[in-house]
Amino acid sequence: MCQVANAHLERGISHKISGDYDAALVELKFAIGDDPGCSEAAHQLGLVYGFVGDFDQSLAELQRSVNLDGSSVQGRNDLALTYSMLGMVDEAKAEFEEVLRIDPTNEVALKNLIFFK
């Protein structure tokens, strides 16, 4: 989790929600600069990279987010969904299974694992 309330993170999320991905990227990079251990900043940055089609960076940031906070079900689900979208079946399945280890009733993971059987 982030050390303190991070205004760049908050602005980055706001820009992401409004669809201003260029501004979101700038703010989220600043948020990580302010707090490199902030898993939520890496998570949000990974999502925005995915929205703009930079999937290598998206995967890198989502993985970094999970490495910083392995218990983040949302981060792991988003990483797994990105893997799925890119056809990385083994990686997606492993992440969804890890989500279920943390949260055995997680609907996102349960629904998506059906496709891997």
Image: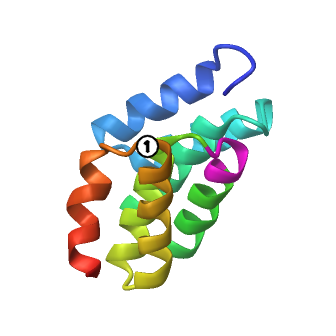
Left of 105 or right of it: where is 30?
A: right
Quadrant for residue 57, please give it: bottom right
Is residue 53 among what the camera can see? no
Give the x, y percent position of residue 94: 49, 70
User: Which residue: 38% across, 40% down?
Assistant: 16
Q: Nearer the viewer, residue 102 or 60?
A: 102
Is residue 26 among what the camera can see? yes
Q: Is residue 80 above or below residue 72?
A: below
* Overall secondary structure of the magenta section: helix
Left of 68 or right of it: where is 23?
A: left
Quadrant for residue 18, please give it: top left
Label 1: element kind? helix
User: Which residue: 61% across, 27% down?
Assistant: 8
* 68 in magenta: yes
Q: What range of the chain is rendered magenta?
A: 65-70
Quadrant for residue 87, please give it: bottom left
Q: Quadrant of the C terminus?
A: bottom left
Q: Is residue 68 above or below residue 10?
A: below
Give the x, y percent position of residue 70: 64, 46
Name which residue type carries label 1.
Gln
Residue designated by label 1:
74
* 57 in magenta: no
